[in-house]
Each structure stands twice: as C-alpha cells, then as structure tokens.
Image (spheres, grey):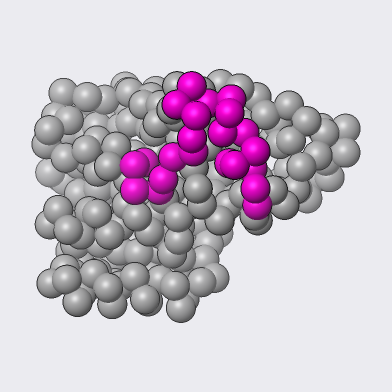
C-alpha cells in the first residue's frame, strides 16, 4: 500500500494514478480539495484499482496521526510513501518575506515530510517489526538554483528535503527501507499559478537545455520507478527530472 501526500492535483495526482495502474493500493491525501481527490479515487477504481481519499494537513501532527490510523484500518500494511505535499508563495525577495510566510513554507514543506516519514518508518522498518518499504521525497531543482528574486524560502525548504533524504536513507538502509528524492525542474502544474506566476514554465522554457517544460507524468514515472523493485539497490539518490536545467 502506498500513501501519496498532496495527491489531489499535479505531480501527486499523476503519481497516485500511475502507481495504481502498476498494482499499488493508494491512499490519496489532500488538504482542501476533497472534490479533486475523490474524482481521482473514482478514476482509479473505475480502472479496477484500489484507492481511498484521506484528508490531512501534513503540517498538523494530529491530522497526520489520524491519517495514518485511517490508512492502517482501511488499506493495511504500508509499503511506500511519497512526500509530495508542498506549497510555494508569491514572488518576493528575502527582505520582503513575513514570518508567517516562512513559518508556513517550512511547516508544510519540511516538517510535514518529517512527520509523514516518521510514521512511515514506524510501520515499514524491520526494527519495528515491519517488512521494509520505500520513501520518495519530492524536492526541486530550486534546491540547486536558489530561486533568487522569486522564492528563496521555497528553495531553502527543498534544500532541507535533500539533506533529509540523505540522512534518513543512511539511517534506515539496514532496516529494509530505501529513501530517495526526485528534483523536478520546470513542470506544467498548478503550483506556478498559486505562486502568482501562471506562465512561468513558458517564460523560462528557453533556459532549459531541452527547450521545454516537463509534465507531471514524466516526474511520476521517476517516482514510481524509485518505489519499485527495479530500484532495489538505489537509496540516498537525488534524481533530477529537470530537462538538464
């Protein structure tokens, strides 16, 4: 069974759909978009897959704990986690950023990933009586580029996810858990509009060596591969899916 956080749209939704088609039972987590999450669940079920929608704000520990309890009861043994839930904010310089913006950025993008990974490790680690599993964190090429003049806070949060991936991978490698990250580049999803830059991919595409933005499905392919037995000797990896940018 696989949990994908932030799976009501974009990369998360594409990952949940592809994983279900590859035989995973999927918990589709969402924070607010119940309609989109339920539509995805119905799509998976209509394709003979098994899925449920589970609400939780990953930055809220009580909601995360309740989500995992629901998954335990309804889908059974956890074998995979995709830490995809994340937020961006409006374009700003660091000297313009408010405390509340920074708090939200790190609460959702970093602490939320830690909380979900913590609960996943408790269920998957052989140290805790589990059978192993795989965790894939969704980072960003911004962690390498810094996003100056746009959202350095988002880039810094994703840099933390890179380090988290490396540390956790080494911590649980002998306990049957593989931990990797994908670092998407310019991907056609709604996240750019939520940050006030709906045309960002089109505008920056000339800077990409492949001269185009990527799709959520292309990122999902990398994530599902890292979850699979085909990546059985891959852990602590930071896989760029960025068109060379």
Q: Nearer the viewer, residue 144 or 174?
A: 144
Count of numbered circles in the view: 0
Residue 49 to residue 182: above or below: below
The residue drawn where x is 12% and y is 43% is 131
Q: Name the residue nearer the viewer: 41 or 105.
A: 41
Residue shown at 33% from the left, 31% from the top? 180
Q: Is residue 233 above or below residue 83?
A: above
Percent of width and height locating residue 87: 60, 50
* Magenta range: 198-219
Where does residue 74 sit, x and y in percent of width and height? Answer: 23, 72
Between 219 and 233, the one lying in front of the other is: 219
Which residue is rendered at x = 88% and y = 38% of the image? Answer: 96
Q: Is residue 234 magenta?
A: no
Asked if the stretch drawn in magenta spans residue 209, the answer is: yes
In this orientation, does residue 64 appear?
Answer: no
Query: What is the x, y in percent for residue 127?
Result: 20, 37
215, above or below 233, in the image: below
Residue most toward the right?
95
């Amino acid at each position: 069974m696989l949990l994908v956080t932030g799976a009501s749209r974009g990369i998360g939704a594409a990952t949940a759909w592809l994983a279900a088609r590859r035989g995973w039972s999927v918990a589709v987590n969402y924070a607010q978009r119940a309609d989109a999450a339920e539509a995805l669940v119905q799509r998976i079920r209509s394709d003979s897959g098994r899925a449920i929608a589970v609400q939780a704000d990953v930055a809220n520990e009580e909601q995360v704990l309740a989500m995992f309890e629901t998954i335990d009861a309804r889908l059974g043994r956890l074998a995979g986690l995709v830490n995809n839930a994340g937020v961006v904010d409006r374009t700003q310089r660091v000297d313009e950023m408010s405390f509340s913006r920074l708090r939200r950025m790190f609460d959702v993008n970093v602490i939320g990933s830690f909380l979900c990974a913590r609960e996943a490790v408790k269920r998957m680690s052989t140290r805790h009586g589990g059978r192993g599993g795989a965790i894939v964190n969704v980072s960003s090429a911004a962690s390498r580029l810094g996003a100056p003049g746009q959202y350095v806070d988002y880039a810094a949060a994703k840099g933390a996810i890179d380090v988290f991936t490396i540390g956790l991978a080494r911590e649980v490698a002998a306990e049957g858990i593989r931990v990797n990250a994908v670092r998407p580049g310019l991907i056609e999803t709604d996240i750019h509009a939520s940050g006030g830059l709906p045309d960002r991919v089109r505008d920056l595409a000339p800077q990409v060596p492949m001269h185009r933005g990527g799709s959520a499905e292309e990122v999902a392919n990398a994530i599902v591969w890292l979850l699979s037995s085909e990546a059985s000797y891959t852990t602590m990896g930071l896989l760029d899916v960025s068109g060379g940018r």
